Amino acid sequence: MKIRTKALATATAAGISVTLGLLGGSAHAADPSRAPGGNFDLGVWELQEPVGSPGSPTTISSSRLQGDNGFQDSYFYTDTRDGAMTFWAPEKGVTTPNSNYARSELREMNRNGSAANWSLSGSHKLSATLRVVSVTKNVCVGQIHLGSGGSSTKPLIELYYHSNGDIVAGTENSPSGGQTTHTVGHVSIGKTWQYTIAVSGGHTIDLTVNGSTTHYAIPSSFNQYKQYFKAGSYNQSSSSSTTNGARVAFYGLTVSHS
């Protein structure tokens, strides 16, 4: 079930100023000479890249990501033109055992280095300002993924950007699988946009895209599971190509829990 509401244009503008806070500065505070960890708070993330051993992609710990000289490479780097934290996931790359698609993606962690694994109760929010630089088919740019509590490896919700400019939410019908898709916006390739994925009260997902909010009821079958956020470039197409893929640039990325 979904209910859509419209936010005021002034709220959208206000959201930009908040989301682009980076490490306490303004939207223009990102320094193109710094690694992503020098511009963004990566103390609550680890990185998964599309390289490594088959079925076992390389992960980069939060401690390695942080700071002006933190980790970066061709799959995860600061764009030297505008300071964007950029993720590149080619169509050919190492994948997890439960996926056929490569990713350059952040996984939420706790400050102490343990894996984030939070209850649906309370309030949890992932906010981002981004643009999709290139994409072959479509790319997942944010999600809530199931953590402990059972055997499912499904997401609760995934947010996709399609090559035609459509922004599509995929809500999981149950931990056993089956995804329902909802078109929630449209932005031309290369244009900057915003999203917030939030859970409130354990019963509802509140998804906001460019100021327009849609609410989705969480099926009770998910109540036994803990959750965590993910964000980046989780490419949704595969081939033998290492030059085709999805490149996503983030200008703001924040997580909050209460």
Image (cartoon, rainbow, N blue to C red):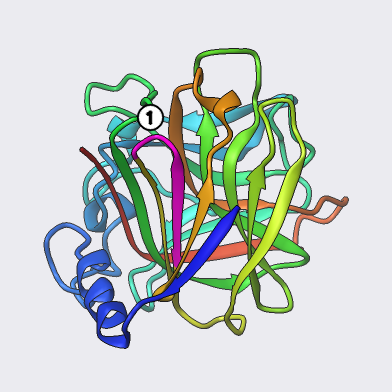
User: Is 72 a magenta residue?
Assistant: no
Where's residue 161, x and y in %?
Answer: 63, 66
Which residue lies at the image location 28% right of the left edge and 27% below the top edge?
110
Where's residue 7, x and y in %?
Answer: 35, 77
Q: Quadrant of residue 245?
A: bottom right
Where's residue 225, x and y in %?
Answer: 50, 21
Which residue lies at the image location 54% right of the left edge and 54% below the top edge?
74
Q: Quadrant of the C terminus?
A: top left
Which residue lies at the image location 29% right of the left edge and 36% below the top edge?
44
Which residue lies at the image location 33% right of the left edge and 40% below the top edge?
65
Query: In the picture shown, does residue 61 fall above or below 78?
Result: above
Please identify the residue farthest to the right as the structure is shown: 240
Residue 210 in the figure: left or right of residue 137: left
Observer-nearest of 171 and 68: 171
Q: Which residue is mark 1?
A: 61
Observer-nearest of 159 and 107: 159
* Residue interval drawn in magenta: 201-208
Residue 195 in the figure: left or right of residue 180: left
Amino acid type indicated by mark 1: Ser
Residue 207 in the figure: left or right of residue 171: left
Query: In the picture shown, does residue 53 fall above or below 48?
Result: above
Please identify the residue farthest to the top as the structure is shown: 150
Element class at badge 1: loop
- The main secondary structure of the magenta stretch is strand
